[in-house]
Image (cartoon, rainbow, N blue to C red):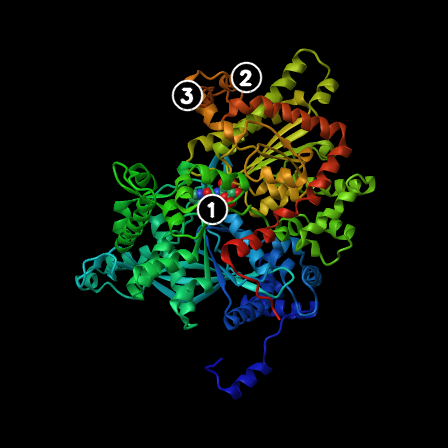
Amino acid sequence: IDSIIPAESRKLWDAHKVKKFNEPSEFQDRFISHVEWTLARSLYNCDDLAAYEATSNSVRDNLVIDWNLTQQRQTARDKKRVYYLSLEFLMGRALDNALINMQTDTSSSGESREMVKGAIGDLGFKLEDVLKQEPDAALGNGGLGRLAACFVDSMATGDYPAWGYGLRYQYGIFAQKIINGFQVETPDYWLNFPNPWEIERSEIHVPINFYGYVDRSSNTSTLTPAEWLGGERVLAVAYDMPIPGFKTSTVNNLRLWSARPTTEFDFAKFNSGDYRNSVEQQQRAESITAVLYPNDNFEQGKELRLKQQYFWCAASLHDIVRRFKKTRRPWSEFPDQIAIQLNDTHPTLAIVELQRILVDLEKLDWHEAWGIVTATFAYTNHTVMQEALEKWPVGLFGHLLPRHLEIVFDINWFFLKEVEEKFPHDVDLLSRVSIIEESSPERQVRMAYLAVVGSHKVNGVAELHSDLIKTTIFKDFVKIYGVHKFTNVTNGITPRRWLKQANPKLASLISKTLNDPEDKFLLDMSKLTALRDLAEDEDFQEKWNDVKQFNKLRLADLIKELNGGVDILERDHIRNTLFDIQVKRIHEYKRQQLNILGVIHRYLSIKEALASGVKFEEVAKKFPRKVSIFGGKSAPGYYMAKLIIKLINSVAEVVNNDEELCDILKVVFIPDYNVSKAEIIIPASDLSEHISTAGTEASGTSNMKFVMNGGLIIGTVDGANVEITREIGEENIFLFGNLSENVEELRYAHQYQPQKLPQSLEKVLNAVESGAFSPDSPSEFQPLIDSIKHHGDYYLVSDDFDSYVATHELVDELYHKDKKSWLKKSILSVANVGFFSSDRCIEEYAGTIWNTEPLKPE
Ligand code: 475
């Protein structure tokens, strides 16, 4: 490799080569250097926050060394690279994870955490307190964003040459406060303090255009090169986050783009004396990456969102193409060198942008270009719900991106021609599959169809979901392209964060039991199957249970802290209190309403029994101790979801203050559910709820996290619950409810027959309607009741209610009367959870979609 540095000087560089810290004392040197030089502080004003910054900077120094080596290796070896495009990366905290994954030169990974813990301990700090200083990088809404975060971890761990591309929002997902039972959103300005985990690359800036017009002065066909003269220009500046693999020196890159004004000046405005306006327009640039849209499974169709999407796709593609061009390969080799994975339809414009680059800028023939494009891209679908499918009005699209709209029309034209050739005279089919929907008042671009047409593979995220997309939203495309374009890759989660980091006690019990002091099981989760033999071993069960109790106490501490230091759960009883947890975004399809109505049912049954004179001891036998824990954010504009949150809090208020219950039932809503809270909540579950209406939850990933932490599941036959059942055995999961194949029929029936509610549910709804939980405004929850009783019960709460309640009775019975069986199920769940590691998932993508191989460090 030619270098700008002369050979003589290079020797000197080598002599001064930077070194990683390997020993506690080396770490301490680095730490103190950062306190003194980076933070310009001293021993006398180094608080936990400063210690966090100094520790992170020290760890980052180590990672940067491996990051550089990894990037050099990937460039020199020139293997196929993967680019994972996601509008969301819900990373959570970085430091603890880096300490677990990082390799020093002398110790193998896993030990670095202990080393640093001791080293900062000697300097007077507690690692636990230092870690808590880090704000979550909450650049995502829920499942989709967290999946992207697990994937970059697994891609680095598997030594894949792979980058993530996303946006560096200044405001992540809002922080949720609960005030008088209502959700209140507050902005998440997460960049208050210097962020040691990002490296600003101001030298990497890409100009991005919007608006303007297409100049075709020389030719008239839209297929031949045209010049797009943008009207507004902003700069995309790169920020890089190092992504360390586990037990490898591979450190990959997550590149997030931030919008900046260009230094170019609007001279027209300036000359006309409109100085203030020309500055104002520049300021507008920053708004593009200011805030993450806070909707989960819902598309609002706002112009700024489309602007974000193009900004990010154009910057990423420019970067990718620039890197490819340095290899001086012919364009035909582009797909051999590059795979681009689209995380949902949000990055679909990348397809159009690459076609534009190849045709307009590189002057390739349209069809040759299109062959390259479709061989490069693959698309992952995450939802079949109509309201989440992206569609953009043609007018808005064409105004912002005039040349791209032309290209979309041309793509569609060739696509429809192909369809017409295969299925002559089927006009209906043509209008069904057209990328342009002929709707009034305005035509729309169907992004999911564009993504299918522009990719060589389309995958769903769990078997049931992947089957569903083939029979519902993409049915016609299966007919057109054949079934092999569509495939399944069941989601996974990273065991480093969700087992080792979240549940160190369980990880350590496992490593001791498996005689695996280096935690190799975190790379090869099939090793866990050895736990099967111990599932009935009483000594082991006791140790297993102790870990669970420890985690339940840890959660009780968190709940107390969030409750202003007041305990809701009595410590002495935690051992025999069932922790029943549902944490995820609040959504009608996820059915937190079913859960809380079930809780009310339990409450009313207890009250009724007591009122009829049954002795408390008897009642407590039938309804043993339980706490129902909820957590999750609602989209700010989602009325029904917000009402569900209010109902949960109102029920909690009544139940928790009812002295007659003597604490056998408690309800807790944990505010501001996020990744770092999840790490405390998930390991504490005895039971978790994954109870979506069958066919609506594409996969779910928290179900996997709970199982990996020894929690049992109550769930519907939906998403990845199906494969979890297959892997861990149906005797180890509590399934209930209608199946997805019956959903349509049931919904149809609701429309034409007056809803007949089960008596149990009738009672519950009557209590709510009577104001039992809102004495000051009895009608407060009417919209929730009406949606079940009078508006067709779209989510089938009434159809599943009785089987849900009955299944909870089975849970109670087992938990309280047969603890040994319970523990056996818990152990067997973990023993068989290996399939759900995201490492397996990434291997499948690499093998069946990307056609890429790992590049191992020498
Ligand atoms: C599914 N988010 C889960 C998870 O595959 C699945 C974000 C922005 C705009 C619109 N929607 C989103 C999602 O659609 C989403 O998070 N989908 C989820 O993807 C990972 O496990 O079942 O709901």
From what the image shows, is residue 315 above or below residue 73?
Answer: above
Q: How many marks?
A: 3
Q: Report whether residue 543 is seen.
A: no
Could you tell me which secondary element the residue under label 2 belongs to? loop
Instruction: Answer with mark 3 or mark 2, whichever residue precedes in sequence.
Output: 3
- Percent position of residue 284, x then y: 31, 55
**Amino acid at pointer 2:** Pro
Task: Tell me the residue that label 2 is attached to.
Answer: 758
For label 3, being within 8 Å of ligand 1 is answered no
> Marks 3 and 2, Cα distance to the nearest angstrom?
17 Å
For residue 173, the mark is 1
**Amino acid at pointer 1:** Ile
Relative to 684, is 241 on the left or the right? left
- Percent position of residue 42, x then y: 60, 66
Instruction: Answer with mark 1 or mark 3, whichever residue precedes in sequence.
Output: 1
Furthest residue in direction bottom, as rendered? 8
Q: Nearer the viewer, residue 138 or 568?
A: 138
What is the quadrant of residue 551 in the picture? Answer: top right
Q: Are marks 3 and 2 in contact (CB under 8 Å)?
A: no
Q: At 44% from the left edge and 39% from the top edge, which residue is drawn?
A: 635
Could you tell me which secondary element the residue under label 1 belongs to? loop
Q: At 60% from the left edge and 53% from the top edge, which residue is drawn?
A: 839
From what the image shows, is residue 512 above or below residue 80?
Answer: above
Point out the image quarter for the C terminus.
Answer: bottom right
What is the quadrant of residue 706 in the picture? Answer: top right
Q: At 53% from the left edge and 49% from the top edge, which residue is drawn?
A: 147
